[in-house]
Image (cartoon, rainbow, N blue to C red):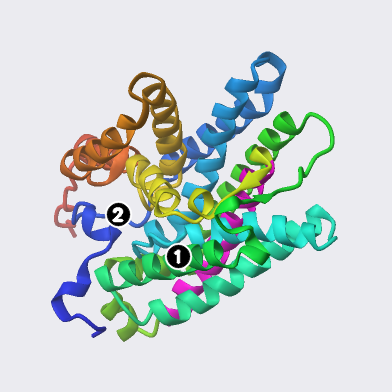
Amino acid sequence: MGPGGGLCNFSVGALAAPERNLREPTSMRRAQLLIAILFLILGLAAPLVVRSDYLFQVLFRVFLFAALGLAWNLVGGYAGQLSLGHAAYFGAGAYGLAVFSKAGIHPWLALLLGVLLAVLFAALIGGVSFRLRGPYFTLATIAFAEVLRVAAKNLAAVTGGDVGLQVPGLFVKSSGRSLYLAAVLLTAVALCITAWVSRSKFGYYLMAIREDEDTALSVGVNATRCKLRALLISAALTALGGGLYGSLFLFIVPDQVLSIDISSEMAIVAMLGGAGTFLGPLIGSVILESAAELLKNIFHEAHLLIYGLLIVLVVLFLPEGIAGTLAHRLRRKSAIAAPPFKAPGPVSS
């Protein structure tokens, strides 16, 4: 039993309904894969019809947060660990690109060094915080990210502090469209990793940990190693997203890329669509980012209140998220439609 006793059973998995089918029907998996492929094809085709730079920025955020939601989903959805510190890895990617480029390193190599920095942070944060469970784990992730944010604000000689730091463009020409396509590619990579995880032995270990960590430990699953492995993959993807974000805006400050707002948005995207599902983060990103852009124009900062209301409604009425709830209803419908099992009659001699 981990620290915290009965209180430590809280996780993302606790938001979901108790009935959970770890194996999805083959037809459902195929349908989800086709939808994901269609989503990516539409994303790649967008530059042929979209001419507005404003629309490209909106689409960039949709695909970027789809990728970030998928990255968060590996830890928060499949492993059931409610992390609210992913801004640490996002900021590491953005600041890694800016700081290493300032030192004279090529931007693409600087981005990779930023990813490596994020993975090192994840190893440190995970090594400590995975000793905790439930709300204690969540608070630990918030604390680590906040330490990095405060450090970035105070190490002005390196990070520029509150004045900010210039970020180089990763592409020379058509930067906005090129970065948009890079976000689509990052989403494709995140989807491939999610597909692999959801069907691998590693993925089933994560889901076993999510459902009951003590039982998983009792049958020989190395829970800490599995969770840490998921976090390292998640951190690398998140850092790539942070680098793309910084390169689009060409300037970053600590409160922009290391705030809890970024961590919360990743979590909301995944939970709205369905934490622990293949398509959930895609659905959540399309809905949340589109609604956020619309609400910003109408209500300005009041859109943050809508975020909070949305979370409450999802937890109360769609605890498995949109994709999770639909999948659950489809499973129930197919179970009802299936003919009842009849025992064979006696065999006559």
Above or below — where is 283 with respect to 165?
Answer: above
Q: Is residue 18 magenta?
A: no
Seen from the viewer's position, the closer of residues 318 and 115 is 115
70 on left or right of 265: right
Which residue does the image show at 21% across and 74% down from the upper left? 8
Is disc 2 surrounded by few (<14), some (14 to 19) or many (20+) residues within 10 Å?
A: few
| Residue 212 visible in the current orientation | no
Residue 93 is labelled as none
Q: Give percent across and percent down for residue 324.
A: 31, 43
Amino acid of disc 1 = Ala
Above or below — where is 240 with respect to 339?
Answer: below
How far, Cα to Cα, is label 1 from label 2?
Answer: 34 Å
User: Quadrant where the N terminus lies?
Assistant: bottom left
SS under mark 2:
loop
Residue 145 is labelled as 1
SS under mark 1:
helix
Which residue does the image show at 42% across and 53% down from the upper left? 263
Q: Give percent across and percent down for residue 338.
A: 24, 39
Q: Which mark lies nearer to you, 1 or 2?
A: 1
Q: Which residue is mark 2?
A: 21
Amino acid of disc 2 = Asn
Q: Is residue 223 magenta?
A: yes
Which residue does the image show at 19% across and 47% down from the upper left? 341
134 on left or right of 74: left
**Dominant secondary structure (helix, strand or loop) of the stretch shown in magenta:** helix
Which residue does the image show at 59% across and 43% down from the upper left? 187
Is disc 1 surrounded by few (<14), some (14 to 19) or many (20+) residues within 10 Å?
A: many
Q: Give percent across and percent down for residue 316.
A: 16, 42
Q: Give, as a single range, the part of the protein colored magenta.
A: 222-247
13 on left or right of 170: left
Above or below — where is 5 with respect to 32?
Answer: below
